[in-house]
């Protein structure tokens, strides 16, 4: 059972899977290695046909033998795609904060969650005034989990909803959100590739509206697998992001910013 009376927050790590056996194992090792004791690992699986479920069941067995086991739950049922599954995770999460760590992605080190928690002056906040969002940096890795580079887009010192006019400056996997706020801000399923960009902006707006702090951990939080859904559908993702940007910042700013993105790409070549 989860004890929500503990003064330190419970962190839900949500992992959405579908036939993810070829990349899932290192994600499982990454979470299992965490030294922070208050972790719920929530799996939302879309009825995988490969060895995904076998790996998760083995992970559960090994977890039960740990000195301080994490709380693991799994939902295995059909879904309408990635973002529908992520909405299910938000609904089901029992943690105070939720972060999405998908197959192939890893927490940066075994102390990552512990360091995140230590970076926040919890004594300043009552439970209802805890920071809306905790965020940090991301490293890019290949399919073998080897470091490739630091993420090109860097997290700003002070993050606001206006920051994302410059693109997704904080990687989705390094964006920890209060679960009660996430439940008020579901992923819009009309977006197939960039709903996370829209989701983050809306949550940042909600934090501003509620006058809640947004906490920079000043830590590298995630090792992000370079080849993801957005990467494989780069052009379609950019078009979606243009419409999302226009929705939040207006068409003039959106078009000017995307013209700069194109020019920057040409210059880099």
Image: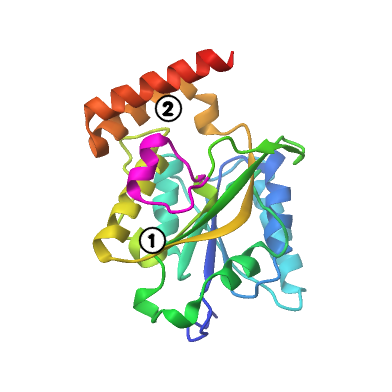
User: In the displayed structure, would residue 70 be above or below residue 51?
Assistant: below
Q: Which residue bears the numbered disc 1?
A: 91
- Residue farthest to the front? 157
Which residue occupies 33% across, 44% down? 162
Q: Quadrant of the C terminus?
A: top right
Magenta highlight range: 155-171
Image-quadrant location for residue 42 = bottom right
In the depicted structure, whether residue 119 falls above or below residue 195:
below
Identify the residue at image location x=38%, y=65%. Answer: 213
Task: State the residue at coordinates (39%, 33%).
Answer: 192
As for residue 166 lying within the magenta part, the answer is yes
Instruction: State the image quarter where residue 91 is shown.
Output: bottom left
Q: Is residue 109 left or right of residue 41?
A: right
- Residue underneath mark 2: 237
Could one spot residue 182 in this view of the protein? yes
Mark 1–mark 2 distance (CA, rounded to whole Å): 26 Å
Residue 1 placement (x, y as % from top left): 55, 80
Which mark is first along the chain, 2 or 1?
1
């Amino acid at each position: 059972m989860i004890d929500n009376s503990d003064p330190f927050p419970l962190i839900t790590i949500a992992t959405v899977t579908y036939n993810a056996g070829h990349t899932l194992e290192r994600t499982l090792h990454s979470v299992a290695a965490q030294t922070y004791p208050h972790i719920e690992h929530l799996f939302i699986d879309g009825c995988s046909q490969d060895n995904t479920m076998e790996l998760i069941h083995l992970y559960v067995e090994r977890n039960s033998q740990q000195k301080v086991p994490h709380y693991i739950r799994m939902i295995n049922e059909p879904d309408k795609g990635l973002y529908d599954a992520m909405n299910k995770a938000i609904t089901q999460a029992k943690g105070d904060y939720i972060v999405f760590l998908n197959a192939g992605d890893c927490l940066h080190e075994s102390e990552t969650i512990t360091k995140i928690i230590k970076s926040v002056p919890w004594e300043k906040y009552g439970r209802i005034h805890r920071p809306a969002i905790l965020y940090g940096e991301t490293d890019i890795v290949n399919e073998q989990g080897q470091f490739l580079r630091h993420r090109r887009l860097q997290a700003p010192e002070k993050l606001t909803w206006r920051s994302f006019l410059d693109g997704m400056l904080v990687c989705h996997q390094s964006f920890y959100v209060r679960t009660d706020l996430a439940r008020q801000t579901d992923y819009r399923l009309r977006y197939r590739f960039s709903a996370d960009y829209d989701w983050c902006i809306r949550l940042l707006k909600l934090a501003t509206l509620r006058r809640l702090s947004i906490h920079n951990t000043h830590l590298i939080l995630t090792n992000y697998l370079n080849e993801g859904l957005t990467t494989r559908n780069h052009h379609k993702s950019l078009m979606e992001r243009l419409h999302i940007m226009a929705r939040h910042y207006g068409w003039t700013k959106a078009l000017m910013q995307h013209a700069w993105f194109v020019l920057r790409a040409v210059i880099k070549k």
